[in-house]
Each structure stands twice: as C-alpha cells, then as structure tokens.
Amino acid sequence: MARSRRIGEFELIARYFAPLARGFKGARGLKSDNAFLAVDRRHDLVVKTDTIVAGVHFLAGEKPELVAARALRVCLSDLAAGGATPFVYQLSLSLSRGWTERWISRFARGLAADQRRYGIVLCGGDTTATPGPTTITITAIGKVAHGKGLGRGGARARDELWVSGTIGDAALGLLAARGRLKSAILEKRYRLPLPRTTLGPRLVGIARATADVSDGLLADAGHIADASGVAVDIERDHVPLSVAAARIVASTPASWATVLGGGDDYELLIAIPKRKRAALHAVARACGVKVTHIGDFRRGAGVHLTVAGRPTIASRRGYVHF
Amino acid sequence: MARSRRIGEFELIARYFAPLARGFKGARGLKSDNAFLAVDRRHDLVVKTDTIVAGVHFLAGEKPELVAARALRVCLSDLAAGGATPFVYQLSLSLSRGWTERWISRFARGLAADQRRYGIVLCGGDTTATPGPTTITITAIGKVAHGKGLGRGGARARDELWVSGTIGDAALGLLAARGRLKSAILEKRYRLPLPRTTLGPRLVGIARATADVSDGLLADAGHIADASGVAVDIERDHVPLSVAAARIVASTPASWATVLGGGDDYELLIAIPKRKRAALHAVARACGVKVTHIGDFRRGAGVHLTVAGRPTIASRRGYVHF
C-alpha cells in the first residue's frame, strides 16, 4: 500500500472513500455521480460536487464567464443524468495569487447568466486564497420525486442504449482549442458545455439507467454496464456526429479514438426497455433534443464496439484524472 | 474596479456573490455561515461549505488524520452554530503532485473516526489532481426543525452575550505550533478543533443569535452585532481562559491581542434574553460544556471592549483571508 502511488481515481474511491459512505443508502456506494438525500416523502435532494482546477480542467487564461459556466454546468449535467431539476448550489472559490477584481466580476456575471438559464441560485460557499492555481468547487443540489432518482445501475439485458445530441465534438474541440485542428464550432462545444437539464428530469419513469458523457462515450457506457451487471454492444456507425465531426473522421479515421474515448460532451446516455421508445421520442421532441439508438445491453460484462457490425478492439479509457 | 485588487473577503461576497443569492431566502444574503433549505414542513437542511488549503489553513506536513479532522470540524462548528444536527457531507479532495496512498489512507481513517464521533456520513464528492497544494473542500449538511435555524442576526438590545468553553487557546496554540511559545496543550487545541455539536442543536429555542468563534472573538461578536443591528459591550476580564492561556496573558499581557483577535477556537457565541439564563445553564450542563457571560447588547453599533469596566480601544480584526 505504502509505495504504489498512482492508483486510479475509481480505485481510490472504492478503497478509501466508499467505506466512509457505508450505511448511507443515498450515497449509492459512491458509484453514482450523485448522492440522493431522502428529505421527505415526496422529494429527494440530489447532490453533486465537482472541482475544476485552472490548467487542468480548464485552460488557464480562459474567459472568466466560461470558467463559471463550465464549473456550474458539469454539475448540472450530473443532476440532469440523475433526473433532477436544479435547485441551489454552493460555491467554493480558491483564488490564485494573481486574481483581480475584474476577473471575479466577470466570473460572477457568468454565474448570473447561467442561474437565469438553468433556474438555479447560489446559497452559500467559501472564498479563499491559494498559492496554487485557481480552484473552483461547486456543490449543486437538485430535486427529484422521492425514490425516482436515476443513476448508472438499473440497465437490464435486452434494454437499448440511446444517446442525446452528438458525440465527440468537445474532445475534437479541445484539440481545436490547442491549435491542433481548426473548427470554431467544435471549439465552442468544448468551451461551453450544454447540459441536458430539460431532458434529464423527463427521463424519470422512462429510463432504467442514465449517465452523462463526461469521461467519454465508451467509458461512461462502461460505467452503466458495470453498475448494472450487464454487457453493452455499441455500433460505432450509429454514434451520432455533428457535421463538423463527421467531416473530421471521414478525412482522419484515427479521430474515432478521440470521438469515442474523449470526454466532456455532457450528453446523456439513456438505457430504456424497448417498450419505452415512443415515450423517449416524445420527451426528446418536447425538449428539442435529438436521441439516437447506439447500442444494446445483454448478459455479460463490459463494453463491446462493433464497426459496421464487426467486433473491434476498443479502449474504453476516457479522461484519466491521475 | 479594474485595478483595486485587494478588497476583503466580506466585501467581495457582498459585491459579487450576494447578488447571485438574491431571491433565495435561505441563503440569508450570504451573511450567514450557513444556508437553510426548507425541504419539508418539519425540517430545514443547513448547508455549509469550507475549503482548507495546505500551507494556508493547515500546516503542510500536518498529520493526515488531523487534516481530515480540521476539514470536517470547521464545517461541523458552523452547523452547530446554526442549531443543526450533522447529517451527511460531500468531500472534494484535490491532491498535490506528491500525494501518496498512505497519506490518503490516513486521511480517510481520520474522517472515519470523526464520522463515528459526530454521527455524519460521506455521501459523495470529487477527487482530482492539482499542480498546487492539496486543497480540501467539504460541504456539510445538517438538519434543524423548520424555521428554527440559528444565525448571526436576531440579537436585541439588552440581550446577553455568552460564550462556550475557553477562548484564545487555538490562536496561542498556533504560536506554539510555530515554535514561538511552548505548550503542548494549547498546540493540540489549535491542531484539533472541538466543534460544539452537542450544544448547538440544544440552543434552538434558547438563543436569539449565535456564531462560532472562527475569525476571532471580537470579530465574530462583531458579526453578530452587525447582523443584528445592535452594539455589543464585552468585558475582557470576563472572557474565559484555560489555565495555560491565563498563565500566558499574566506573564505577557500583549498576548490578549492574540486571545481576543485570533481565531479557530470553534466555541459558540450565544446571544440570549436574560430570562433564558437558566435554560442555557441547563443545556450547557447536560452537554458538559461551561458557558460564560462575557458581554451585553445595547442600541448602537460595533463591538466595544472594556477592561475592568473601562473602555479600551480594540481591533476586531480576526483572521484575514486575503
């Protein structure tokens, strides 16, 4: 134990922190992105904490408004995957030595715009100085009908796997932000996540399991499969791409690895029984969100990728935190 | 606005973040340490977020168990001041580059011990890597009867100001930890806060206003006075001292500035109407906590210190975050 320094994030959580959550069912063994607090007979609160660090999770020098949006939206995406409607949030802002009041003013303006957009309000937090990079932790709290919160566990063999929107734009957009390819549209998709906050709550009663695509499509589909105790087959050519992304993979097929393995799309993966297809289409249409059937669950374990129906070896490695 | 970089924490919050909490009453204008979420007709959730940074809020090289205890207990102290009973918490752990599994194992052990001690349980969070110092954010959630949460506002002219335990030990203990005086007892008081979690919830129905002593006795008494719109007179010679602290101020009277201005005591300041004296004594006795009458509220504004009844000029400056 003493010397093996670089265990992964999931292992770290399982080994040291999951035991601390034992005995509190709403923590779901820390295998869920969200915690569920049963506060009365009608509602559960859904709680999600996320930390972003300058230079690690957002580009140092990023516009403060976009940093604010990213900090809040990565949490809102998890609440959406949990089926929850946004309620309130707490903000911890640790400011690096070079902070200016102008930066904070713009950061606050970004939060204000997103509060209006997503119907959430600041309820408290902490501000402090740090000798390290600016670090932002948001704990977002949403509401869902009691016992109805969605999560990764719950998919069954013969369920279908659907995904909202398009996949890969953010990961390709990060390459664009780093100057490694050119696309203003994709770069914006990376810089400004669009959490599916209207779709998420409407999936309650339709989806058996959900996850947001934060670590990467294959990784997050794998988390659903693992948590549900089933396997999932995904057909690459069914994965929905934007026009810009489709053009890139057409000219550079190696970009598929970025599309399927990259993260930060903040789309929703949705496991449904076949009979819920019409219901899923109805709520997606009501939200103006496209949904696409990309795979199927079966007995077994793991994520299995096919290309035009033929099995392929795929790394499900998403974004690795350590 | 653009160039004035060093405004204070309270001003920063008032100018940029309080507007973001407008319209949500439970945020109390961000003037309270706690947020109050009315979740049903019987209970409110009390929410508190606190961030500690290695080298800033705890000594780099501190024992991981003590870091864990500090991170959790500073939040528990605020919940206690809010009259709340601990419920669950979220943990964001940003690990500096030199992290070892052994450190995490000991950190988790510290959390486990405090979970048992204080009846709180981990329900989620985030772990990430940072190029900066290890940074820990805890969002603790407690419960209080609906509408009964305590805070800084509410003290009235002619109310009495009481304080639990002894004052100044932690600030003197910090000097001891830095080798500037010798006292193992005081050093421990600094390293290991003892939040008044049993007393706090019992103050509901007795106290008109409360605060924990985190910024310093005069500063925190001042926060109560400001939030309540009254003045408070504090008699220095009534401030309860430990034997160790009393010895230090007897030999070095200049240490009074440390005692009254230093922070981190995590005792409770309690404003009560005179008729609640007996009730306060009863609950304090039941908790095994000493409480001392140190001052009185009156019309006016500010904190006013007397020494043996004679007015004195006192800086209420507590711990300054920026």
Image: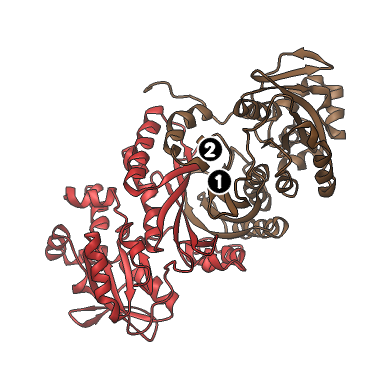
Chain colours: A red, B brown
Taking A27 as reference, is B62 above or below it? above
SS class of the residue under badge 2?
A: helix
Q: Are marks 1 and 2 on the same chain?
A: yes
Residue in the picture at 49% in, 61% down: A43
> Disc 1 is attached to a residue of which chain?
B
Q: How many badges with numbers are in the image?
A: 2
Quarter of the image for residue B225 reads top right
- Badge 1 amino acid: Phe
Taking A214 as reference, is A179 above or below it? above
Q: Is residue A285 visible?
A: yes
Q: Are marks 1 and 2 in contact (CB under 8 Å)?
A: yes
The residue wearing badge 1 is B36
Other-residue count near label 2 (Cα within 10 Å), few / some / many at <14 / 14–19 / ≥20? many
> As rendered, which of B200 and B255 lies closer to the eye?
B200
Residue B300 place in picture, x, y as percent:
65, 17
Residue B250 place in picture, x, y as percent:
87, 23
The residue wearing badge 2 is B28
Residue in the picture at 76% in, 41% down: B189
Task: Give the spatial CA distance, label 1 vs label 2.
Answer: 8 Å
Left or right placement of residue B71 versus residue A124 in this view: right
- Badge 2 amino acid: Arg
Quarter occupied by the N terminus of chain A: bottom right
Residue B190 place in picture, x, y as percent:
73, 39
Other-residue count near label 1 (Cα within 10 Å), few / some / many at <14 / 14–19 / ≥20? many
Left or right placement of residue B261 versus residue B238 in this view: left
Taking B224 as reference, is A29 above or below it? below
Left or right placement of residue A109 versus residue B215 in this view: left
Residue A261 place in picture, x, y as percent:
30, 65
SS class of the residue under badge 1?
A: strand
Q: Can residue B182 be seen in this view?
A: no
